[in-house]
Image: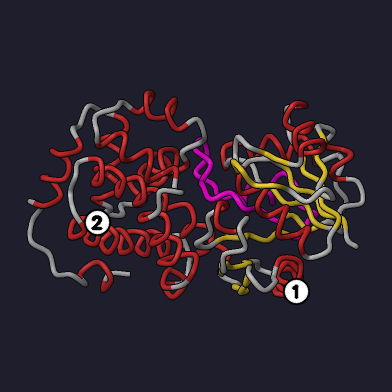
Amino acid sequence: MNKVCVLGAGSWATALAKVLNDNANEVILWARRQEQCDEINNSHTNNKYLEGFELDEKLKATTDIAEAIADSKVIVLAVPSQQVRSVCQKIKSLVSSDQIVVNVAKGIENKTGKRISQICLEELPNNKYCMLSGPSHAEEVSRNIPTAVVAASECIYTSQTIQDYFMNKYFRVYTNNDLIGVELGGATKNIIAFGAGILDGLNYGDNSKAALMTRGLTEISKFGVAMGAELSTFSGLSGIGDLIVTCTSMHSRNRRAGILVGKGLSIDETKKEIEMVVEGITATIAVYEMAEKMNIEMPITECIYRVITTDLNPEEGVMELMTRSKKHENESIFKL
């Protein structure tokens, strides 16, 4: 058995711990709250994040991060994107160079605009890094519903190693060496999912959502290629695949948050109602500001940014998008 630690104990962290446990690894979850650890260790549940799901008795949890990391072959970073740097700083004196760091958070650091791999390179420069991303809801993975994801790394051996750790009969893992594209696909789709929720909150229909998702994918691709990603990546699991599942499922907290905004709640009221990090809100701000500096036209992202940061009414924002100057559908793609 190989020991694997999962830093974080939310829904996705718990689901991935289950996958790793099913694959005959020794898995330990790190949580900040002792009462959550006690629930996992004694009751074998984590009901705040995966209600009604029973965990294997072999799964353990601890509040001691050093205990979690010690002797682990793989360290899974399963904390919100804005907390990744602080967690890396917490563990940098504890890790050894032969431990692989796997990030599963989909986001961009607000203050710096950096991708998670860039943060890890700064804070944990001696460790191999891999990103696990794709259309995957924790609620479904925990029930063994067939799911396919991507392990992305600049080192093919690293991505193949992580593929071996996670892949099984219900959790299929592909490899990809376009780390930039996989990271940006996972981060930017949350923006469009938040927008899709707004449309649902406004009681718009399938036509509107299909248009948003399609034109949103154009923005995602344009931004990604400008940042050094490969265009083909956005046609894969971490691109259109993740976009579809996040824009259409009620498991998506980004979509649920958008619904509340579309119904008239403020951003602060929405965050309070969701009770978990809404990556789409933070990603919108980071991506819009980066696109502005790079002179990349992203009208949907700009509209959502204004809904978040100003008093723009969502319905007025939709009308602005609908009445923009005439365009050729592939005009922006030709400019890539």
**Residues rendered magenta in the picture:** 102-128
Real-space Cα distance between discs 2 and 1? 39 Å
- Residue at x 24%, y 33% (from the top left corner): 263
> Where does residue 234 sit, x and y in percent of width and height?
43, 68
**Which is the main secondary structure of the residues drawn in magenta?**
loop
- Residue at x 21%, y 61% (from the top left corner): 211
| Badge 2 density bin: few <14, some 14–19, many ≥20, Cα 10 Å | many
| Badge 1 density bin: few <14, some 14–19, many ≥20, Cα 10 Å | few
Question: Does the stretch in magenta take in 95?
Answer: no
Tell me the quarter of the picture where residue 154 sits.
bottom right
> Where does residue 186 sit, x and y in percent of width and height?
49, 56
> Where does residue 213 sit, x and y in percent of width and height?
29, 60
Q: Nearer the viewer, residue 309 or 30?
A: 30
Q: Nearer the viewer, residue 96 or 276?
A: 276
Question: Eyeballing the image, is 291 above or below 174?
Answer: above
> Where does residue 116 sit, x and y in percent of width and height?
60, 49
- Residue at x 68%, y 55% (from the top left corner): 16
The image's colour scheme reads secondary structure
Q: Secondary structure at mark 2?
A: helix
Residue under numbered circle 2: 209
Q: Nearer the viewer, residue 115 or 83?
A: 83
Q: Secondary structure at mark 1?
A: helix
Tell me the quarter of the picture where residue 132 sits.
bottom right
Which amino acid, by three-letter code, is at mark 2?
Answer: Lys
Q: Which mark is residue 157?
A: 1
Quadrant in which the N terminus is drawn: bottom right
